[in-house]
Amino acid sequence: MIIKATFTVYARSVKVTRIIIGLVIAVVLSVLGTWRVSLAGAPETYIPNDPYFDKQWALKKTQLLQITADDPEVLIAILDTGIDQQHEDLAGKVVANVNFSDSPTASDLNGHGTHVAGIIAATTDNGIGGASVVPGCRLLNVKVADDNGRVWASSIAKGIVWAVDNEAKVINISLVVPNSSPALEQAIDYAWSKGIVLIAGAGNNIKSVPVYPAAYPKVIAVAAIDSEGELWSKSNYGDWVDAYAPGVEIYSTLPGNNYGYQSGTSMATAYVSAAAASALTTVTDTNSDGLVNDEVAALLTTLFAVPK
C-alpha cells in the first residue's frame, strides 16, 4: 500500500486535492522492500495534553509521527539562528552547540531557530506549550546565521561538515543563499556520502528561480502549503522543489519560554526533517549500498512531492 498526496499543478499555485502527506503514513512499500514509519496515532484517537496543541493545525490535520521510547534517538542538526535551549519545551534537547556566525553567542537572539526546533522536537504530552513531531529526538544547535538572520554559504558549509562529524543523521537547513558555492556543494556531497539526510527550505520570494542549498540534487527542497492545501502565497516553487509541507501560521516555541506563529518554507522544512528522523529508524537498505539516506529521500519525495 502506497499512501501519497495527490496534487493538481498550476503555473503559480499548487492545489493539494487531499492532504495525505508524509505525516499521515503508516506503511509504505518500495519496489524492493518494505518501509514502515512509526505512527503514534490519528488525531481523533491521540490528543496530547499540551495546552497549545489546538493552535497547531499541521499536527491536528495530519497524524502525529513520533519516535517511540524503545526506538533509537535520532540526532538532528538545526542549522539556523541558534536555539534557546533553556526554553521550557526544549529543555534537555540540545546535546551540542557550535557558532559559525558573526554573533557572539550560539543562543538564539532572533527566534527563527528556536521556532524550527520546537516544530521538530518540543517535549510532547508534558502539560506545557505545544506538541512536536519527533519529541524523542536530540538536537545539534549549529548557529550559522547571525542575530538578524543573515547567512553566508561558507557558514552553512562549515555547519554541515561539523554536523556530520558530530554524528547528525538529519540536517535541517531552513535558510537560503541565492547562488551555488563550491564549498557548500562539497559539504553537501560529504554529508550525503556519510548517509545523512539533508532538507532545506525553498525560500519565500514567490519565484521559480532555484536557491541553495535546497536546489542541490542531494538535498530535499521544501515549499510551503497552508491549512487548505494551497501553495503559500510567498513560497518559491518549481520543478526543482521536491516536497510541499505545512508552513503557514505554524505555532511553535520562541525564545524566553514564549510561543507564537511564523510562516515560511522554514517551518515546512522542519516538518519534513522530523518525518525523515522517524523514517530513519525503520527503513532498510534496499540497494545494499550500506546507507539508507537514499531510501529515506525517495520515501519523502514520493510522499511529499508533486507527481510529474
Image: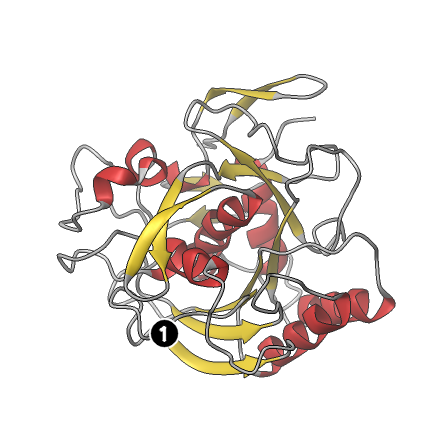
Identify which residue is drawn at 34% across, 48% down. 260
Using a 10 Å C-alpha cutoff, classify the residue at mark 1 as few (fewer than 14 neighbours), some (14 to 19) or many (20 or more). Answer: many
Residue type, mark 1 in image: Gln
Can you see residue 27? Answer: yes
How many marks the image carries: the answer is 1
Report helix, strand or loop for mark 1. Answer: loop
Residue 163 image offset from top left, x and y in percent: 58, 76
Q: Residue furthest right?
A: 182
Image quadrant for the C terminus? Answer: top right
On screen, residue 252 versus residue 9, left or right, reads left
Image quadrant for the N terminus? Answer: top left
On screen, residue 26 versus residue 240, left or right, reads left
**Residue 160 quadrant:** bottom right
On screen, residue 294 versus residue 41, left or right, reads right
**Residue 287 quadrant:** bottom right
Can you see residue 133? Answer: no
Identify which residue is drawn at 22% across, 38% down. 54
Residue 216 image offset from top left, x and y in percent: 76, 53
Q: Nearer the viewer, residue 220 or 201?
A: 201
Disc 1: which residue: 85
Q: Nearer the viewer, residue 40 or 177?
A: 177
Residue 297 image offset from top left, x and y in percent: 60, 51
Above/below status of 43 relative to 79? above
Residue 291 image offset from top left, x and y in percent: 61, 66
On screen, residue 36 versus residue 100, left or right, reads left
Q: How is the image coloured?
A: secondary structure
Identify which residue is drawn at 39% across, 71% down. 84
Q: Nearer the viewer, residue 89 or 165?
A: 89
